[in-house]
Amino acid sequence: MLILNAAATEAALPWHSLIDALDHMFQADCQMPVRSHHDMAVPGRANATLLIMPAWLPGRYCGVKLVSVFPDNHLSGLPAIQGGYILSSGETGEPLAMVDGPVLTARRTAAASALASRFLSRKEASHMLMVGTGQLSLNLIEAHASIRPLTDISIWGRSSAKAEEIAAKARERGLPVTAISNLAEAARQADIISCATLTEEPIIQGEWLKPGTHLDLVGGFKPSMREADDEAIRRSHIYVDTRAGAMKEAGDLVQPLEKGVLRPEEIKAELAELVSGIRAGRSSASDITLFKSVGAALEDLAGAILAYETVKATSDNTQSS
């Protein structure tokens, strides 16, 4: 069985290949039960969340991700997301690979946002605002920059020092990123706004959004969590990764649905419908589009398969040469 650590997993998941792998998986015959979601008490700290996410391609591959989110891990100098992914044969159940969970999760999440952005953001979008400074932030910046001609990228966080740290890492990778302090001003100018936070109170105000903005909401994965207010929902054309997941777990949708601000039929499409052409994406340069993701097990399976096949092909080529 291959063991892929964080560095090996990242190297095996280049953005264009990963985005395309997700595109194909959303159109494939992937079986994906609703994930198991458990709250866990952590004495003296914020509650943690345990997620168990299985998926399989009949006769080809099956896999399961065991991942946890510990919001206060920064107090221990650790990433909030921990876990791993086991990829097995879909014919025999033989374990094939253990893939680093945090890297797989971060990269497939960012790739899903970039895949949605292919259909929802304006092709000429050049200014991105990243809201949040966790592990996902640099991945989201890179993923969006891989599909749109971004020439001005801003990052905002509650900690200005952390925002500058992420900006510096991005600049080392050749990306034009600047840490900013005025969130409202940056949001009013941005073509793409990506949010990856653990907030329970909306950060993004709908009144800030200019015509043509694409809003990418990634962080809120529980009904109590929200990153954008009701006005943002009212003004936006809404899209999701999966209806089953987003309408059950995403506070950015669950709360407006409960209050009548949003009706289920107003959710225009999920990713599978966008990539297959069943539903259309952006229809006007002035539309405000909103993509809400909570994560889907098929995304992890697609990433794990890509990582496994990439590393195995490299290994086979090395042995045969």
Image: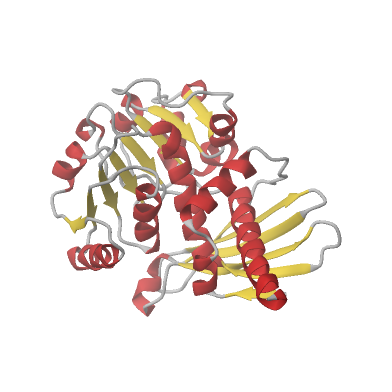
The C terminus: image quadrant = bottom right
Q: Residue at x 73, y 51 (%)?
A: 56
Q: Residue at x 43, y 29 (%)?
A: 238
Q: Is residue 144 above or below residue 52?
A: above
Q: Residue at x 56, y 38 (%)?
A: 242
Instruction: Locate residue 30: give its quadrant.
Output: top right
Residue 311 is situated, as x and y percent measured from the top left of the image, at 62, 68
Q: Is residue 14 above or below residue 128?
A: below
The residue most toward the front is: 321
The N terminus: image quadrant = bottom right
Q: Is residue 113 above or below residue 76?
A: above
Instruction: Locate residue 126: give its quadrant.
Output: top left
Q: Residue at x 16, y 55 (%)?
A: 180
Residue 241 is situated, as x and y percent measured from the top left of the image, at 52, 40
38, 288: nearer the viewer: 288
Q: Is residue 4 left or right of residue 151?
A: right
